[in-house]
Image: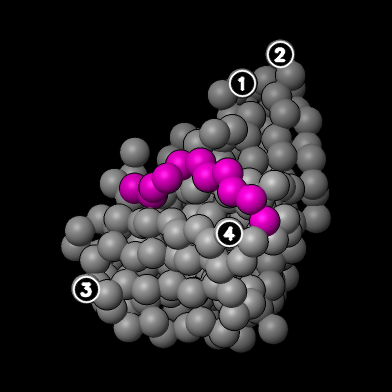
Amino acid sequence: DTGVSQNPRHKITKRGQNVTFRCDPISEHNRLYWYRQTLGQGPEFLTYFQNEAQLEKSRLLSDRFSAERPKGSFSTLEIQRTEQGDSAMYLCASLPGGPRSYNEQFFGPGTRLTVL
Amino acid sequence: AQSVTQPDIHITVSEGASLELRCNYSYGATPYLFWYVQSPGQGLQLLLKYFSGDTLVQGIKGFEAEFKRSQSSFNLRKPSVHWSDAAEYFCAVGGNQFYFGTGTSLTVIP
């Protein structure tokens, strides 16, 4: 257990529905990352936050994807109008930030999304 | 463009044998390099990291990796593999954004 939690762990939804995932990072970590991992692939960077500021979102897969971190603590990833191709594991990671963090990310267990 | 290549999709080794997993990267600046392990149903766990200094870095579970700037490589090694090392291994590079390879699946036979 890294201290990063994600909920739900599994989500099954029908095509066209909206889904939202939550990530709770380690409390003192100010950077938070979202990744997508499909079968047989490595994690694919989606977006990241420094506190509440979203510093990179151009790699979000489409405009159906959005992420928030309103108070600089937990974050949510929303997928609107889900498609079968969205089926994947969605990973969250946090890291302390700052010069002594060495960019070491701590990963959560992931949320597995299945779109029927 | 930043990228990571892990040329070996799957490797099988006998328990007690040595192991080397290859990783090549492309990165515009001084790279921060990482190796992660992922067991079935488990999250990603950091094995080791390189930022600067000594090019041979030691990690957990008896793993080590060597950074070779001239070859843009960061290969992972272990002198003697244990059955519990069977897992998926990912090499990653990055600073603010991180790029992962496609992974190498390790099978350990008794």
- Callout 4: 10 Å neighbours few (<14), some, many (20+)? few
Question: Dot 1, crowdedness within 10 Å: few (<14), some or many (≥20)?
Answer: some
Q: Quadrant of residue A61?
A: bottom right
Query: Can residue B77 be spotted in the picture?
Result: no
Q: CA distance from mark 2 to mark 4?
A: 47 Å
Q: CA distance from mark 1 to mark 2?
A: 7 Å
The reply to whether the magenta stretch includes residue A12 is yes
- Which mark identifies residue A71? 3
Q: Residue at x 47, y 35 (%)?
A: B61
At which x and y percent is residue A36? 59, 60
What is the chain identity of the residue bearing mark 2?
B
Q: Earlier in the sequence, mark 4 or mark 3?
A: 4
Q: Residue at x 48, y 48 (%)?
A: A110
Percent position of residue A19, x then y: 50, 58
Q: Is residue B47 left or right of residue B91?
A: left
Q: Could you say where residue A22 lies in the image, as x and y percent from the top left? A: 37, 56
Q: Position of residue B103 (x, y in %)?
A: 69, 50
Q: Name the image quarter holding the N terminus of chain B.
A: bottom right
Tag 2: amino acid: Pro
**Magenta region:** A5-15
Q: Is residue A107 visible?
A: yes
| Disc ID at residue A51 | none
Residue matched to label 4:
A17
Mark 2 and mark 1 in contact (Cβ < 8 Å)? yes
Q: Residue B83 got which mark?
A: 1
Dot 3: element: loop
